[in-house]
Image: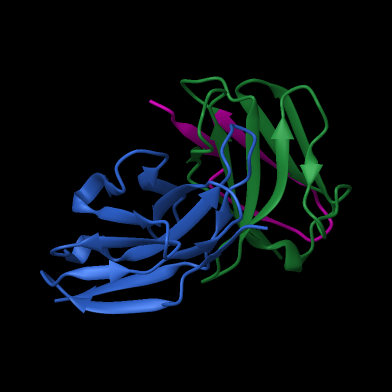
Amino acid sequence: AQSVTQLDSQVPVFEEAPVELRCNYSSSVSVYLFWYVQYPNQGLQLLLKYLSGSTLVKGINGFEAEFNKSQTSFHLRKPSVHISDTAEYFCAVSHGGATNKLIFGTGTLLAVQP
Amino acid sequence: GAVVSQHPSRVICKSGTSVKIECRSLDFQATTMFWYRQFPKKSLMLMATSNEGSKATYEQGVEKDKFLINHASLTLSTLTVTSAHPEDSSFYICSASIPSGSSEQFFGPGTRLTVL
């Protein structure tokens, strides 16, 4: 069975500082990995995804993530955060296919302080 | 592209009434739609997977008679919360995946249901 672990429920960081949000997954087969962002009272927006190929994936808003198969991780990073990056971030995993479920982590609240 | 809408965005109803939430894929055809429930400061809980023209597949612990799902066309799925009670108050989010997709789901903006 697949599972996703986001160990940090909240990450406080000062504006313009770098940030890393951690995500680890468990699966016995190949997976697709996603990071979504949710602003208050809104749905989820895709930040980036890993399907295959290069393990370093670049997404929107300056975010990137690196797929590490040996460590079963897919950590999200941004070199310099803005106040507007304050939101909930969800890591998700799937086996693929349009009908396949996404398994979500518990989310990490990125709280950017001035 | 790949825009999903939900209606209404917010609804308040009395206990015992039924509420219907619509989920539409605006610029693509979605053979599969998903319904999630999200509690405050919690992750998304998948309620059911909705396939066009067939019965929805419900997750364990989700009452199918309580949460009626209909996916009558390739662009519309509806969730009806029947005989709603205060404990059904929550944020309901739908998503849709494209037929040739990689499991990427496109999410609607969510519906805030408050049952008095």
Name the side, left or right, on which B86 lies relative to A4.
right
Magenta stretch containing residue B14, yes or no? yes
Q: Residue at x 77, y 22 (%)?
A: B53
Tell which chain the image draws in green: B
Q: Quadrant of the N terminus of chain B?
A: top left
Say above or below: A88 vs B59. Answer: below
Q: Which chain is blue?
A: A
Residue appearing at x 27%, y 69% in the figure: A20
**Quadrant (top left, top right, bottom left, bottom right) of the C terminus of chain B:** bottom right
Q: Which residues are magenta?
A: B1-24
B101 or A42: nearer the viewer: B101
Q: Position of residue A59 (x, y in %)?
A: 27, 45
Q: Residue furthest right?
A: B65
Q: Residue furthest front?
A: A70
Report whether A13 appears left or right of A48: left
Q: How is the image coloured?
A: by chain
Q: Position of residue A100 (x, y in %)?
A: 63, 39
Question: Does residue A54 appear to the left or right of B87 in the view shown?
Answer: left
Write the residue at 32% across / 70% down.
Answer: A110
> B100 or A111: which is nearer to us?
B100
- In percent of width and height, residue B7 lies at 57, 38
